[in-house]
Image (tube, rainbow, N blue to C red):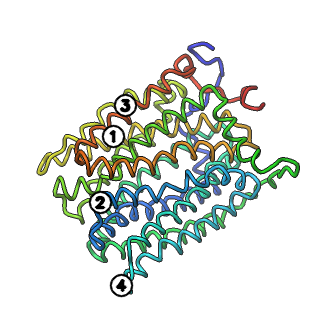
Amino acid sequence: MTDESTDPQPAGSRSGSPALWRHRDFMLLWSGQTISEMGSAVTQIALPLVAVLLLDASTFEVGLLAAAGTAAFVLIALPAGSIVDSRPKRSVMIVCNVLRLVVVGSVPAAAAFGVLTMAQLYAVALAAGVCTVFFDVAYQSYVPSLIAADDLMDANGKLGTTQAFAQLGGPSLGGGLVGLFGAAGAMVADALSYVVSVLSILGIAKREEPPARPVDEPLRRRITGGLRFVLGHPVLRQVVACTGTANLFSGMSWSLAIVFLVRELHVKPALTGLVMAAAAVGGIAGGALAGRLAKKIGSARIIWVSTLVFGAPQTIVAAAWPGWGVLLAPLGWAIGYFASMVYNIAQLSYRQSVTPPELMGRMNAAVRWVVWGTLPLGGVLGGLLGTLIGVRATLWLAFGGAWAAGWFVFFSPLRRLRDVPQSVPESASR
């Protein structure tokens, strides 16, 4: 393994593929996901505000609510990968969005009748999380079958930019909707966004190849196949360690974000979305620049550079204070979002490049099981530590830990590799 790749066209070497703009099916998927991400960003603001404003939830209860939203990745991610690999991924995505429409829509309905409780919020967060597990595993496994392999970095960059744009427009939209219709009423926008997403997926013309379904392989072996592949790969296991650790600490910080803004920095509830949306500018920049940065720095090297170098200044969030000092919060979040967006696009493209198609769903599920499985623990720890040592002290710990996670990928074979080879290595197909 040398410092420079000998591949004439390494993954991520193209700064943008004009073909994707003319790719009808990809544009349908992308546009539908844009609307859906906007709706989800509204709920990201509205759901904790429902707990804080309508039900007077404590700091610990808000942390538990954040944990409930990601607990499904611990509980069902591994079997979800096996199920997704054995079924049409497009159909899985449609069913998941229909179910999320019903689940999210139950919150404003219950609030309208005056029967909303914290128990329902926990149930909604958990049920929506289950649907998200299946949708995300199917979604990440579906994209490589829809477009050419050498367009993956560009496609993931576009989809990542969409997510960041939703984080920019969604929270500010959510804050405005909260001001107009209340926290629960704002969640209607998320429910309706799933309708648009379903229609866009239904409009995709390309049909998948029928998934191969082994009849002689026990379910347990199929479930653990993706996990064995990931943990047996010298780079993927380090990527998983890095992402899982970073998500643990990020779960701590995000579970306290609303509490920090409202109770520590005295930001008005209707303005919390605007503050958090400003941070999403960094994510938009990261999604737009990921391909160019990968070309300049290296599509493999950018994975550790993004988190250790680009992400270092994000800790300034914890130094924010009421008044003009509030600006440090969106600035630090923007830096962290930029770094994490570049990192996520690069590592996802790497994972898709080294994984055989028949393992794609289980690989994505195994990765999500580990890296998203740490989020609920982070939410609980955030709420607990925020209560015991204070919100600000917990944020210092959380941001410092998220940055330090980058050392896992630095001390991996990626340190000696500039670019990601496009061909699947032998060790990945065994």
Q: Which mark is residue 310?
A: 3
User: Is 227 left, or right, of 34 in this rendering?
Assistant: right
Q: Which mark is residue 273?
A: 2
Q: Is residue 198 above or below residue 288?
A: below
In x, y percent, where is residue 417? 57, 19
**Image quarter (top left, top right, bottom left or bottom right) of the N terminus:** top right
Nearest the viewer among 63 and 387 is 387
Is disc 1 in contact with disc 3, using a CB cutoff of under 8 Å? no
* Residue located beneath label 4 in the image: 114
User: SS class of the residue under badge 1?
Assistant: helix
* Residue located beneath label 1 in the image: 398
Q: Residue placed farthest to the left in the image?
A: 323
Question: Whole-Å distance between the Cαs marked 3 and 2?
Answer: 24 Å
Q: Residue placed farthest to the front in the image?
A: 388
Is disc 3 in contact with disc 4, using a CB cutoff of under 8 Å? no
Mark closest to the chain's N terminus, 3 or 2: 2
Mark closest to the chain's N terminus, 3 or 4: 4
